[in-house]
Amino acid sequence: KMVLFIFVALLILSTASCELSCGYHSCNQGEADKLNVHIVPHTHDDVGWLKTVDQYYYGANSSIAWAGVQYILDTVVQQLSVDPTRRFIYVEVAFFSRWWREQNTEVQQEVKRLVQEGRLEFILGGWSMNDEAATHYNAIIDQMTLGLRFLNDTFGPCARPRVAWQIDPFGHSREQASLFAQMGFDGLFFGRLDYQDKETREMKLKMEEIWRGSQSLHHPEADLFTGLNENGYNPPAGFCFDAYCKDDPIMDDPTLEDNNVKQKVDDFISAAHKQAKHFRTNHIMMTMGSDFQYSNAKAWFKNLDKLMKYVNSAVRYKNSDTEWSVKSDDFFPYADAPHQFWTGYFTSRPGLKGYVRESNKYLQVCNQLETVAHLRSGMKSNLRTSKSNVLREYLRAAMGVAQHHDAVSGTSKQHVANDYAKRLYIDVISSVITEGSSNLTFCDYMNITLCDFTQNSNRFTAVVYNPLARAVSKYIRIPVDCTPSYIFVVIELLVPVSEATESVRRNRGNANCELVFLAKLPALGYNSFSVIPPISCIFVDLIEKYKSSATNKRLFTPKGKVVNPSDDITISNEVFRDETILTTKEMNFCHVNFNRNSGLMDSIFGYFLSSIYFERYIIFKSPTGAYIFRPNSSTPFHCSNDGKVKLSVLTGSNPLVQEVYQKFSDWAYQVVRLYKGIKHIEVEWTVGPIPVKDQWGKEVISRYETNIDSNGYFYTDANGREVLERKKNYRPTWKLNQTEPVAGNYYPVNSRIYIRDAHVQLTVLTDRSQGGSSLSSGALELMVHRRLLGEDSKGVAEPLNETGQFGDGLITRGKHWLLLDTVTSSAKQHRLLGEEAFMSPLVMFGGATPPALQSFIVNPLPPNIHLLTLATTNSGELLVRLEH
């Protein structure tokens, strides 16, 4: 038999390195012949959720929830200082760095001592505990860098986190494990996994394992020890000693009638026994803390001291087995009950998701330009105090907060989501408009054809910057007023503004055209393009010229027309030639005939009605909400009430772009574009305001149907990097009892999803994170927008009903890019296009003419080498990350 032995433990997994007084050396290693219960005092401090970041830190807005992070850190440090046996772990550097700046020198020195002695341990070390479904790996790396850099600069090597701690994200990505392994973490602990998966693991003693985070890296480069917490991240039942918990404290005065020591000891030993049965070794961990706990740290530590004192004499046994299973897939999708799949948040708040993705591009561009300026100064500039770097630090911090698992995930309250977006907006604008580019204008509503500078100027210069380290050619679209005519320095086309664009911009702006041209851009550099009024008697009205050059009967009709089923609307370009034509099919959908091998593809817009719960009567007990996706039916409804779609076409003789405009309804539009010389199709969708007057929430999907024999298999990316194989109604490591045929087959799509057969692959790339699936052979679907009237009872306590700027519902616009190629050639195509979509050119405007073309790199990188990071640290060191 083995004696049960409990102690306050730091999250250390190895005893191999003890060269420092902190870290491994400071941890009680336990005893080989005893059941070692590792007590881990902690607090989980969301960087925004029900309250904003500022409100959580200061303890404001208590009508929603009581939580004040500054008081938690105050009392924890005080209690650690009075007893050298006490330990505590902390995660969120976004909060800690703020608290640190407010402390006097005496407190800061005390905290440094606690860190050096290993009694205050930082784990994870990121600016926030990032989401794993809606985040891109570039942003994950940056937010981890920001937090880890602060810890290293402030405390040195003793503050280096050894263990990753992802206790609250709603599903876990294989790429996240790979990144942690490559960052040098010894292990990962998390708290949420599918309820069926957990039952299987508990039965088979697989609550700890080796997670193989990559199929392309050699083992063990991406292997990571992974532990699954028994109680999520909460204490065992009856042992929450926080000021706001209802559990009894340990009352150990022997003269008291209410002395409860024996009961507490018995309950704890019972909980330890129950947990130990699910693990293979004589070491188990019990998390002691939860959301925003330890505001009165004395209550926690005093009771934990008593608990260890009275339990350590109890005798119990535990067998030991150190063989670990190996997992090579991921932990998506996550469900905590039969009809509660947490797959709705893959799409929740699509506007915020798109803005976070776009803000990341601005951050990378700012990092690059700051580094170029620093190099040009001979690396003599003082970056710590420079205005541009201070602004950049604000943007880095705002982006770090935005990766939090209740931020980009879309699972916060509305006022908190507004705060996330506001932080990004202020810091993006401040960072882009700095000393180096103060003579240039940035237009942040270009996606809806709004730019005061270009639509009110007869003469201007467009400066287009390419953040990729390889040359690219990209089509640029600039809003202009067609009343004056323009002569452009390159071949161009004026395209009238579509009905969808007029609808989404709500009469803001007077641009009635978009100037479209092909910009050839150098690697990591810019090119400038001048737009000037006509010279002398030269007068060219490009719209009329374009219309008169159209040789077929399908002239562009700006307001569209209802197309009969027999109408033959066709667009093609010289790349596809006879292999690809885009036309209408029957009376509602787009029909693409790629070639005789790939067959047909239909582009369909539809929506699911959301399951809801009314107090008057029950429709479904598990409603859809910000987290949960549970449609009312497995069959989506068409966005057009009568099944007809209003169609118009822009085509002609050898234009730069051909477009088919689809109006499904007053709130659902789609434009299918085929650019000259481009081997992919661009689909621009505009959705909203989603109507809810019928009292039904709606979740809008875009579905692409082909005759590809995919046989239930499809593939999704992991955080924009590697790709995982998916199979309908299947999990690789446990037998699935599928209770939700739609939601249970949805997976996060950060950048791409594809299907294939033996010969052909259809890949759809996205401009933001979305939920996606293949529910039938040959079909792909992506959820692009959600508006709900119900609430899923997962804590937010309000419906996901984004009413938008004008109060009638949020309008969201985005893009999909469709690639069809052979299976062997597809990877090269979608990898390069994915980089170009993620780091698309940045367009700015000015009156003066800068140098026409300039590259900041001597030699462009080859296509298989990607410049992930080019930045400068506060100390002036260059940070360069390259990936294959």
Image (spheres, rainbow, N blue to C red):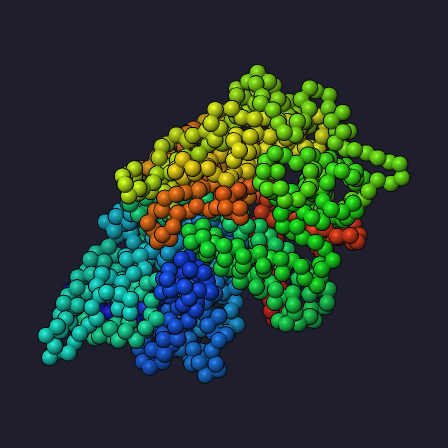
Percent of width and height locating residue 467: 65, 51
Percent of width and height locating residue 757: 48, 29
Residue occupying image coordinates x 29% and y 69%: 243
In front of the other: 805 or 638: 805
Q: Is residue 491 above or below residue 329?
A: above
Q: Is residue 257 visible?
A: yes
Q: Is residue 124 above or below residue 730?
A: below
- Image quarter hosting the N terminus: bottom left
Q: Outermost residue, top direction?
A: 566
Q: Is residue 11 left or right of residue 396?
A: left
In front of the other: 185 or 559: 559
Q: Is residue 342 visible?
A: no
Residue occupying image coordinates x 15% and y 72%: 261
Residue occupying image coordinates x 70% and y 71%: 380
Q: Outermost residue, bottom direction?
A: 106
Q: Is residue 731 left or right of residue 643?
A: left
Residue occupying image coordinates x 42% and y 51%: 411
Percent of width and height locating residue 30: 27, 70
Percent of width and height locating residue 184: 46, 61
Residue 119 occupies which quadrant of the picture?
A: bottom left
Residue 497 occupies which quadrant of the picture?
A: top right
Q: Is residue 589 left or right of residue 305?
A: right
Q: How many marks?
A: 0
Q: Is residue 672 left or right of residue 26?
A: right
In front of the other: 391 or 484: 484
